[in-house]
Image (cartoon, helix red, strand yellow):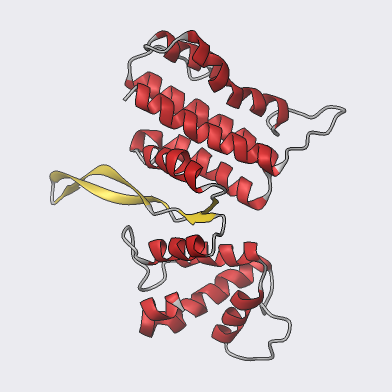
Amino acid sequence: MLLRDELQSSFATCLSTLYNKLAYLHGKFELNETRSHGEASDDVLNFMLSCKDEHFLDVIELVFNSEIQGVSWPDNRMIPAINDFFKIDNLPYHLTPYVMEEYETSFHGTPTTGMRLTQYPQVIRKDSEVLHESALKPALHILRGKEFSSANSEFLCALEDQRSGDYRDCLTKCGSAFESTMKVLCKDNSIQYKETDTASALLKSLLQNSQLDSYWEQPLILIATLRNRLSSSHGAGTQSKNVSPHVAAYVVNATAAAIVFLAGEFS
């Protein structure tokens, strides 16, 4: 209904685009088993009304990364509207905004700056309104900075893994995002480090060049410890490693909080 009202005359084109994208995504010529040579738009609408929750969330993401006519960026009022829908029904999801970065270019030989799209909107988990507002949302805002592009990509991949239930990989990418963030902070603050440094070495370097006491090392390094012990970054050996949803949620929120904390200390 939101798509219909926002796109109006281009709504049919939108459904046609979504039909082709969804057909490839699910490997089906027809999205609904009961469809019999009907319109593609009807097939998409019936699919959206009857599919599993995770498939509907895929549809939402496809709307914003399929270059659909009428779906503009970076400002799109459908994004806050969808988040309002999530909030009204108390659903544990949040749609992130487009991520843009400034870059150097030229216009008729004159140096100037431009803006380019680096990340499409993505549906992420939001298990707690308080944690989302105090940790996850501020962390995503910080990571939109150009210098944090690698950390941003890694953290968004971690959030995607969390939503899809791939919790071990979620921990791996949280650890990577944490390390990438610390490397950026070291570079921006002229703190010596090596690209091969582990999280422990990076954290020690940061703490030694801050007003923070050494006892901060233990709670902050826990992110890397859990990554090493439970994630898919190391072989499980003879014992299987199972990561529960609440452990993944803890690591995601702890990573976000650590990013906000360290960025605040070294800004």
User: How many numbered discs sit on the rendered protein?
Assistant: 0
Residue 176 locus on image (x, y percent): 55, 31
Residue 3: quarter of image: bottom left
Q: Residue at x 48, y 20 (%)?
A: 195
Q: Residue at x 78, y 33 (%)?
A: 241
Q: Residue at x 32, y 57 (%)?
A: 74
Please tell me whether residue 154 is drawn above or below residue 5 in the rendered image.
Answer: above
Residue 19 locus on image (x, y percent): 56, 76
Is 27 on the left-hand or right-hand side of 1? right
Residue 124 locus on image (x, y percent): 53, 51
Please tell me whether residue 53 is drawn above or below residue 18 in the rendered image.
Answer: above
Residue 188: quarter of image: top left
Q: Nearer the viewer, residue 81 or 204?
A: 81
Residue 232: quarter of image: top right
Q: Nearer the viewer, residue 86 or 243?
A: 86
Q: Quadrant of the C terminus?
A: top left
* Residue located farthest toward the right when viewing the structure as drawn: 238
Please tell me whether residue 70 is drawn above or below residue 238 in the rendered image.
Answer: below
Residue 198 in sight here: no
Residue 126 locus on image (x, y percent): 54, 50
Is 184 on the left-hand or right-hand side of 124? left
Q: Residue at x 13, y 51 (%)?
A: 108
Please tell me whether residue 21 is drawn above or below residue 134 in the rendered image.
Answer: below
Is 133 on the left-hand or right-hand side of 58? left
Residue 205 in sight here: yes
